Image (cartoon, rainbow, N blue to C red):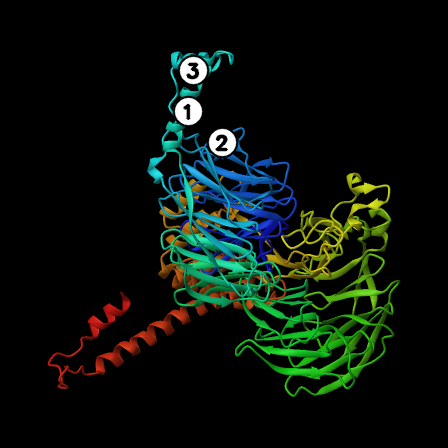
Amino acid sequence: MKFNFRFSNLLGTVYRRGNLAFSPDGNSVVSPVGNRITLFDLKNNKSETLPVATRVNISCVGLSRDMSLAILIDEEGAAVLVSMIGKSVLHHFHFNKPVHSIKFSPDGRKFVVTKDKVAMLYHAPGLVREFNPFVLDKTFFGPYDETTCIDWTDDSRCFSVGSKDMSTWVFGVERWQNLVFYALGGHRDAIVACFFRQNSLDIYTLSRDAALCVWECDTPLTGLRPRVAKAPEEAAAEEEEREVPCGDGEGEKAGEVIHGKVETEVAQYKVHYKQKFKYFFNKDGDFNCLTAADYHKATQILVSAFASGVFHIHELPDFNLIHSLSISDQSISSVCINNTGDWIAFGCTGYGQLLVWEWQSESYVMKQQGHYNSMACVSYSPDGQHMATGGDDGKVKLWNTSSGFCFVTFSDHSSSITGVTFTSTGFVVLSASLDGTVRAFDLHRYRNFRTFTSPRPAQFCSVAVDSSGEVVCAGSSDHFEVYVWSMQTGRLLEVLAGHEGPVSGLSFSPGQALLASCSWDRTVRVWDVFENKGNRETIQLNSDALAVVFRPDGKQIAVATLDGHISFWDPHQATQTGSIEGRHDLVMGRRDLDLVTAKHTAKGKSFTTLCYSADGECILAGGRSKFVCIYNIQEQILIKKFEISCNHSLDAMEQFLDRRKMTEFGSLALIDEGVGDEEGTAISLPGVRRGDMSSRHFKPEVRVTSLQFAPTGQGWAATTTEGLLVYSLDRGLVFDPFDLDVDVTPQSVRKALSAGNFSTALILSFRLNEKQVIQEVLESIPHSHIEIVSRSLAEVYVLKTLDFVAVMLESSCHLHFYLLWAHQLLLLHGPSLKARSASILPLIRNLQRSTQKRHDEVAKLCDWNMYNMRYVLALAQQTPETPDGGVAEEDLDENELLSDLMI
């Protein structure tokens, strides 16, 4: 088994906080998700989380003009320069203070960063590798309070900065002769956004009290005069005139005349602003808290968002309301418009929502929301195409593993979800909840078609379904019983009693009708559900059992106990076959409020979730820690540890507390400093009431609540505090040859291929194990020789060919060609493959997943073409009428209609 699993994607978290940004082509949106960023491709309907992470949560994102570079700045002011092409970190930089906003200039040569009361102008990183990509050009002072927003003119010669002191400052990138800086007032609250008009110095400013000021400049954008350097003789003469003694009346008078003349000349060409209009978004005060805004210069469309979840779209400069809509009951944190002005992206921190709205057609382009509270459980579908997650918010969400999007949400439960599982067919999802119900959801019609309840109310904390999908079991945490229902009728078949504590886990054997249940009463019971309907075996443990799982072949069970052990048992003989001491591998961090050290805290920790690998050789374990461990079962040793998060915005990340946060009165973490946004204050003064006084700020603790290996064996998923993390095998970065010797080279492979020895060339390419060479050989074999080559392959190369065909079916355009390979290999080597079906089950599932995915894509395309052809034929059968009611002489041409429709 390979263990080079790498971070692949982050699902379940689409937006946390910070600013959204569209790509230059307008087809993708970049969203900060905690200490990572996710790129949502709206055109191809895919999402990708970059394998780049900052130390704490990201507060602002800046994209270059060509989107080749991105600057990520976290809450502490640490910046990371990221290559969007290579998806890697190029440089680290620290601004030493929290940064409020960052924006590149339109020409891409500079960028401005605002922090505290200053705005700093930097040279943008170039295409060549530099020792220090961040070179400070100038620092601009002026505001008396924290700066909030930035905007550039179209020619990149000036920029504006908004501040909390209710003023907006216009600065010149160069020290222009008629403009160095200009301060604009007129507002009664903090500035939220400021925007220049297209090809103009006119500016719009918006404040938090929902007021819009229109400022008109008397100088065009091309009227900025460069500063002329004075000659040395003129500078010396001017200096002599300034040094005239004050006692000399003539000199004093001459000096006044010269200075007055100079001031008159400068004042004559100085840039001046005047307030032309002032608008208020809502005079009744219903939406008087403006939180975010964006302006599209080409179409002059202004989008303003409010704390009530309402947004307005206005046309400037006349301030005509186009429409108003409420998208949430939480505050909208960020707004962004793409380059064409068609799509508007909204981010809501409260619910973790990300919406992309097409305002002209008034429809959603994308609408995604993660679980409001933390995720509790995850389950893969049998083919690996979908994943189901349950959260503490009572919702069950289904995710597409290829696109990373949630395509359906079930909200039938009224309490936290404790377990989800798929049936063997993959068309039904079962979920258990603390509301006392187990619900079955149909994935064809997306509805809850069956609800299972107990005779007396019970809180279900685990759920399992047998391999046939006919029997559903759930364990309760208050009555200590296991309930068995029929999927077809929904009737309660049996109540399995015997446990003396909450039933913490259930697992069905894949091959037999055996059910294993673990409980806090330090026992694991194996039940024969169909035959005896009673307790078959009872396994005594040394500590409370927290999780139980069957091996894929059904011949072994693994149990995680409260003392940090993982024990392995034979379910038929009730004998122990192995044990792993995993307490020291958890490496628990110390929380801010813990009174004991992390070393002593880890003594009481244990694994809470287990999962076997697809081949059954290894086991995956996780718990209240930032690490996920993979153990070899036979050798009983730790193979690899995965650190799921490096985000220090979460609690229990560090092993030792920061002494800078410790005072003589205790830890500074005991002081509630508010939520850290515009509505909260650090420590309120007496008599001051602002924001929600009942709200409290807390740091969520990092933990792993559920683990699941993919049925294909190519990856695994974990529900964590940050979301649903997906790890997969990265084959492109590892050279992994098979039975390699000095004679196996790309030249020898191509020589055998050119000689027509297709079987030899294919075997040599698999021994070299390079994807490009294997693909070249396979696609060079004529389709008429596929049967002959398939018949001559040995069994080990049959498996490798099937594995490669399954991978190529997902992305290759030669669909029929690779389907012929799969058909011939399965047809000719079917008996031998069936004899070892248990060991090659992940490979078969991977092939099934790829085939089913392409089948769905082709089926949709064929249906779309069929409906269009029916529409064309229906139009062709209609006889057009003339304006006078007669019949037209010419008939409709079907070919012309078809060509027009395709255009």
- Any part of residue 588 in sight: no
Is residue 139 shown to the viewer in this render?
Answer: yes
Which numbered disc flags the more N-terminal residue, 3 or 1? 3
Judging by the rendered image, the residue that carries numbered circle 2 is 129
Q: Three-letter amino acid code at disc 2?
A: Arg
Residue type indicated by callout 1: Gly
What's the distance in space between the residues labelled 1 and 2, CA to CA? 51 Å
Say whether marks 1 and 2 touch (CB < 8 Å): no
Task: Give the mark toward the camera: 3 or 2.
Answer: 3
Residue density around tag 3, few if under 14, some if 14–19, many if 20 or more, within 10 Å = few
Q: Is residue 702 above or below residue 170?
A: below
At which x and y percent is residue 527? 78, 77
In this view, the mark in front (3 or 1) = 1
Q: Which of the image's four quarters has the C terminus?
A: bottom left
Q: Name the mark nearer the viewer: 1 or 2.
A: 1
Residue nearest the viewer, comparing 751 with 720: 720
Res. 615 mark: none
Q: Which residue is mark 1?
A: 260
